[in-house]
Amino acid sequence: MVEVADEPTGRNTRRKTRTRAALVRAAQQILAEGGGDGVSIQAIAERADVGFGSFYNHFQSKTELFTTAYAEAFQAYVAWRDAQIPAGTDPVARFAMSVRLTGRLGLLRPEIAKVLTSRLAGSARGDHGPAGPGLRMALLGALAALNPGRTDPAGAEVTVIAAAGAIDAILRATAHRPAQEHARLADGLARDLLRMLGADDDRIAALLAEPCPPTTAPSEDH
């Protein structure tokens, strides 16, 4: 006997999914515009074009919503960044391209960049800043490749912290710079970090000569 799906239940699930997505999207727009501090739940619901009561079916507070909005923007950034780097790229080249792409985020994916550098991002981000776990792993991979046999966990930790702070600072700086400066700042940071990791000038020059991004940047929809 063929079972018939519960269509009303399916419609309800899809409606809940759309409502949640609309609320997250509205929160991301508010963050990208530099707001969020004093915005009301009613205003968020109106922007999302959902009922006020629907908010509490998905989130317990504005803080939870904005944290989720930031986290999903961060996930979109990671997916975009990683999709630009071909599989099998060696660790040093992967790290260099990751830094160059992140420094160009405000140019290539401006809405995501605005969310990640918004005023409320500091309280929403947790451990997921622009130099998040994936980029830290790329840095450690490059460090190991450039310094085989190195056994200095404390030194590696300092290097990661310094690099993460620099990457975050460049992303924030480019948000207030003309578009033509994004590539210069991003590549300058990649050059300095590669030197810090131990790459020689010839290898750095070759890495920075690679086109960035190597594939066509996707649309802003996410």
Image (cartoon, rainbow, N blue to C red):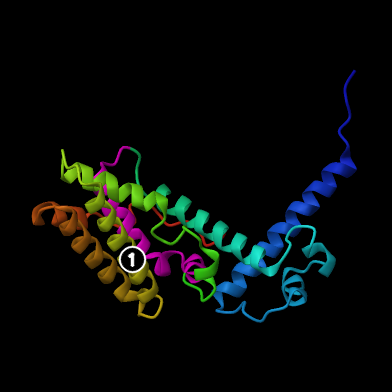
Residue 198 counted in the magenta span = no
146 with respect to 83 (left or right): left
Determine the residue positioned at 80% across, 53% down.
15
Residue that appears at 34% across and 47% down: 137
x then y, percent, for residue 220: 52, 62
The amino acid sitting under disc 1 is: Gly
* Residue 209 visible from this viewpoint: no
Quadrant of the snapshot with the C terminus = bottom right
Per the picture, the main secondary structure of the magenta-coloured stretch is helix
Dot 1, crowdedness within 10 Å: few (<14), some or many (≥20)? some
Report the quarter where the N terminus lies.
Answer: top right
Q: Position of residue 189 (x, y in %)?
A: 25, 65
Q: Is residue 186 above or below residue 207?
A: below
Question: In the image, is 81 to the left or to the right of 94?
Answer: right
Rendered location of residue 58, percent (x, y): 75, 57
Residue 43 image-quadrant placement: bottom right
Q: Residue at x 29, y 56 (%)?
A: 160
- Pinpoint residue 188: horizontal percent, then vertical percent: 22, 67
Q: Residue furthest front?
A: 154
Identify the element where label 1 is drawn.
helix
Q: Nearer the viewer, residue 82 or 152?
A: 152
- Magenta residues, as a range? 88-116
> Does the magenta-highlighted stretch encompass residue 111?
yes
In depth, the one of 35 and 157 nearer the eye is: 157
Residue that carries the numbered disc 1 in the rendered image: 165
Q: Quadrant of residue 161?
A: bottom left
Q: Residue at x 45, y 53 (%)?
A: 78
88 lies above or below 117: above
- Determine if residue 47 is in view: yes
